[in-house]
Amino acid sequence: MKEQTLTNRSMAGYASAEVGITAVETMAQIYLLDFYVSTVGLKPSLFGLAMLIAILWDAISDPIMGYISDHTSFAKGRRRPYILVGGFLLGLGAFFLFTPPDLETQTSKFLYLVLAYFLTNTFMTMIAVPHISLGGEIGFTSGERNRIFGWRLFFANLGLLSGLLLPAIWVSLGKDGFTSRSYSSASVWVLLCFVSYFSYFFTKGKDSPYRRTETEPVSIGENILSFFRSSVFILRNRYFLPLLLAFIVATAARTLNASLGLLYYKERLLLEDSQVVIRILLPFVFFLTISIPFWVYLAKKFGKKQPAFWGSFLLGVMTIVLYPILPQGSYEAPLIAAFLGGIFAGSILLFDSLVADVVDYDELLTGEKREGAYFGFWKMATKIIRAIGFAFLGFLLEAIGYQTGAQTQNPELGWRLTILFGPVVGGLFVLAALIFTRMELTGEVHSKIRELLSRKKNIQKRRSSGVSAG
């Protein structure tokens, strides 16, 4: 069977949508808590509850969207149309999320956040699940998938930069906290319209429409039953479950890390927000970006499993050791953590690439291509943990003494944040690495799966040709 090959132009074009997707995610993870608590004036506990409600729905919608995109029969492809429309709607949702009207009561602020984040996350699902699923589908070999997801991580880093820098740029132009967030979200909306079109355009002809078979469910009831049967089968996949559990724990660590970052640097290290973004977070993104070829090389040489394990494990050890001992008032010392953290965090691309390899095993067993279903569960796990993390974090901040709207916080708050930001987050990364060791899909096993899958497809092709000839 002839293997599919992709040019770097096609890979980059496909991955470009990740700039806008990640920009929205970054603004939500880094700025949303501080924006609604400090600027809008919402209580942290109500913020956490709003996140829990909105994201839990969004998490449930991910596998549903995956199933829908697996079974869509648009002439332009089963994934691409969702990317194009989803990009526009996601930008619109992000704009309203960071541009709330003048609300006076806690109840009105809470309800607005629930609705705005509910819509934003729904539109995120519409573009993100089909997009990541398409990445797993257009790559044939394991090495090719590593490069595809390497490109995704590269553009995700550009999105991370956009999400970090845009608020700082608008502040430098004299805009206040509220206006800078609003203008930033409007800028991301424009960006999303462009990159979602680029991804749609450069994947033309690489996203085949779904072909319905005679045994496929037709009615709504049959489709619902088929969806649940598919979900049960996926969760029983011997390779997918340990990979998913490891990713869930790592996502919990990343959620706490992203949400507590600005508070840690401000309250513990006594640094200014704008300087933290420029002098610490930007170098982190730079080191993360340049690490991508390094992890692709390691995966090619040693397989994906060992590099993915050591990346997560060493990231956890570094987090546990370094963050509690960083000196106050220094912008130079955190660069060590930014360098090591950026390098180790680059291994995350291997986890996404491994999901695509797991789908090959599923296709070997079932004869179906269900990237959407698998990546739908992948995204769902991320959002459930993020929802729980946000809700837990809101109550936790109040428990450790964070005072909403106060100019000066309790002196003990800095050290309490350090424990969370360092040992707790680092311990979760280490735990994720240990869980990951239970995942038995090595490079050798996947090569055998690909070989059997190719043989199976060749046999089916010959049988189909024989029937047609007869």
Image: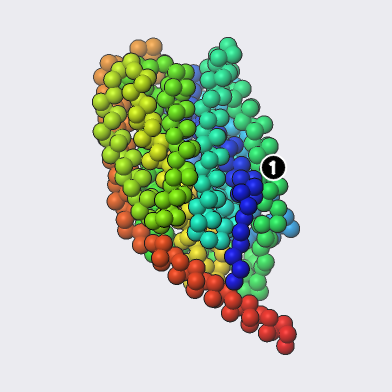
* 100 horizontally vs 299: left or right: right
Compared with 100, 300 (above or below) is below
Describe residue 128's horizontal placement relative to residue 308 as left or right: right
Which residue is rendered at x = 38% and y = 14% of the image? 406
Return the x and y of residue 158 as percentages of the image width and height: 55, 34
Give the residue at mark 1.
197
Q: Is residue 151 above or below residue 184?
A: below
Q: Amino acid at mark 1?
A: Tyr
User: Can residue 390 be seen at all in this image of the molecule?
Assistant: no
Going 43% across and 47% down the picture, which residue do you hit? 295
Coordinates of residue 120 in the picture (x, y in percent): 57, 37
Indicate the position of residue 228 as horizontal and vertical percent values.
50, 62
The quarter in which the C terminus is drawn is bottom right
Depth check, front residue: 195 or 8: 8
Q: Position of residue 180 (x, y in %)?
A: 57, 19
Quarter holding the N terminus?
A: bottom right
Residue 422's quadrant in the figure?
Answer: top left
Give the camera-side residue of 302 and 165: 302
